[in-house]
Amino acid sequence: MHISWPWRLAVLGALVTVPCGADDVKNIAIIGAGAAGSSAAFHLWRYALEEDIAVNITIFEKTGRIGGRSLTVNAYNDPTEPIELGASIFVGANAILVNASERFQLPMSEPQRLEKDDITAIWDGYEFVFQTTEGSWGGWDLAKMFWRYGLSPLRTKRMVSAMVDEFLKLYEPPYFPFKSLSQRSKQLGFIKMTGITGEQLFKDTNIDSRFAREILQVATRVNYASNLAYIHGLETMVSLATDGARSIETGNWQIFEKMVLESRATVYRNTTVASIETAQKKAQSSSPKYIVCISDANSGGDSPEQHSVEFDNVIIANPWQFSKIKAGEGVLERAIDEIPYTKLHVTLFTSPLELSPEFFGLKPGSKAPATVYTTLDKNEEPKQGADGVGRTGFYSVSTLKYIINPKTGQKERAYKIFSPKPVTAEFLTRLLGTEIPESVISSKGEDTSFKPITWYYPHAFYSYPIELPRVTFEDPVIGQGVYYTSGIESFVSCMETSALMGKNVARLIADDFSGISRPDIVLDRFDEEMNEQVAVEEEVKEGIHVQAGGEL
């Protein structure tokens, strides 16, 4: 009887996850169920099927949900109106997320368009340096762009396309999988971009400085809360790669929940990992096994207990400095690099009101933009961190969509604000042009007693690293059978790259279990090219030296 491939997968899947006590089962612990941890579980399960490896995957997640920094909240506390709080979109080039969305048949949609004649503007704190109107002829906006900035928009687009093409090489052999992100970055030439700021990158490539400040810096501010002077060139390019932007209608976190479900992993929610220790070896030649001590996340981490299973591998799939995990002797081969993260304040609210024109220095009664992105004024000094926001005080105020208030039946706007500090009642009063009392911002949820703001939800989290220039990155292999995924975030921080590192670690583990050896052909070629380059340089130097000596 012929069994179709999906059915064979289902049958094999039942065989992959076996009782933990089986002698030949490989037990893997994954700490964190965000993009990286979920992807690691999903791809490890798939590779185990392909290589006929019996695995038992256990995920420890300190919160009660799957998805990490990808999460939604419900406007008006209505589950039919989910709004992304973090990790709002992914793009067409994000192969892992796109393929998973299609595999799980999750409903995808493009970002919602605003209403006709709604304005999107870029504000430097003094004036709108660029604006576009919904429903207007796109060619007119393009003409304005070229008239103001010359060929810089076209050159930038070509640079972004070239970067994406190179980046996608990380997904396939011979560049995938990789044990060293630093080596791969060097081999693919990315250190030329990660080693300098976005500001320097655009200066070196003759991109108009006004275009860089007025347009390109908007992307790094809204995506990474950073000015061009304090973010490396590769992350700058990534922030501009927005072709084919999309999201899952019910929340992007659904991708990762589906990955975990398909992996057949055992998931411990609301569980904190307190420590990782090496277990006593049963034989001199055997690989180490690891003991994980856990506690109830809601108890404040008191009285951790040893988990009943000893693990062959441990994947640490969250930023190390936030985990507070104690690593016993011999667990880590080296200290994990601590990367500073940006604390971002995200404020969601609904209101029947438009933004106040007077907030932006317009005359009363003027039409204010529906969405405002910000940049620095030409005379402002770029700064790092929260101080870098400048005189505008926020990175963006966006009208996400128009929405019907279920209590009143009235059409309202769902707004999202990105800012380095908490939004205040005084700020909202000026932004909306009407008095907003402190009581509105002091509590989450609906406020039926005050009409200008009908639902309010503030949140703050460490959203992504401060992406300063660097040429080395934390490698995924940090111990014998111990892996780390968050090192990729100082390289590029987004859902897709975290998912890529999860997939990469899964492949490395599967290779180790199945005895697959992958000679680094790329590294061999790279070393040969470097040796040839050094030889040529030495030959040139020798020639110059002889010539100079002759002249002297």
Image: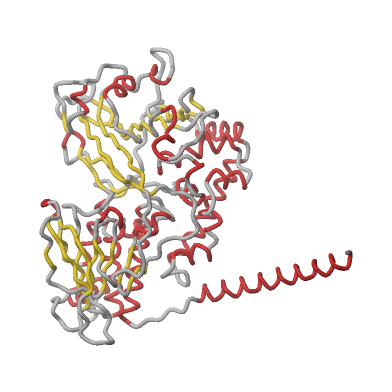
- Residue 516 coordinates in the image, percent (x, y): 37, 81
- Residue 275 coordinates in the image, percent (x, y): 21, 64
Total count of labels: 0
Q: Is residue 351 left or right of residue 447?
A: right
Res. 7 in view = no
Q: Quadrant of the N terminus?
A: bottom left
Q: Height in image: 424 above or below 52? A: above
State the image quarter where residue 489 is shown: bottom left
Q: Height in image: 465 above or below 478? A: above
Res. 389 in view = yes
Front-most of residues 342 and 528: 342
State the image quarter where residue 3 is shown: bottom left
State the image quarter where residue 289 is shown: bottom left
**Looking at the image, which residue sits at the far top?**
364
The residue under the point 27% across, 70% down is 329
Front-most of residues 246 and 420: 420
Q: How is the image coloured?
A: secondary structure
Front-most of residues 260 and 302: 302
- Residue 84 coordinates in the image, percent (x, y): 28, 42
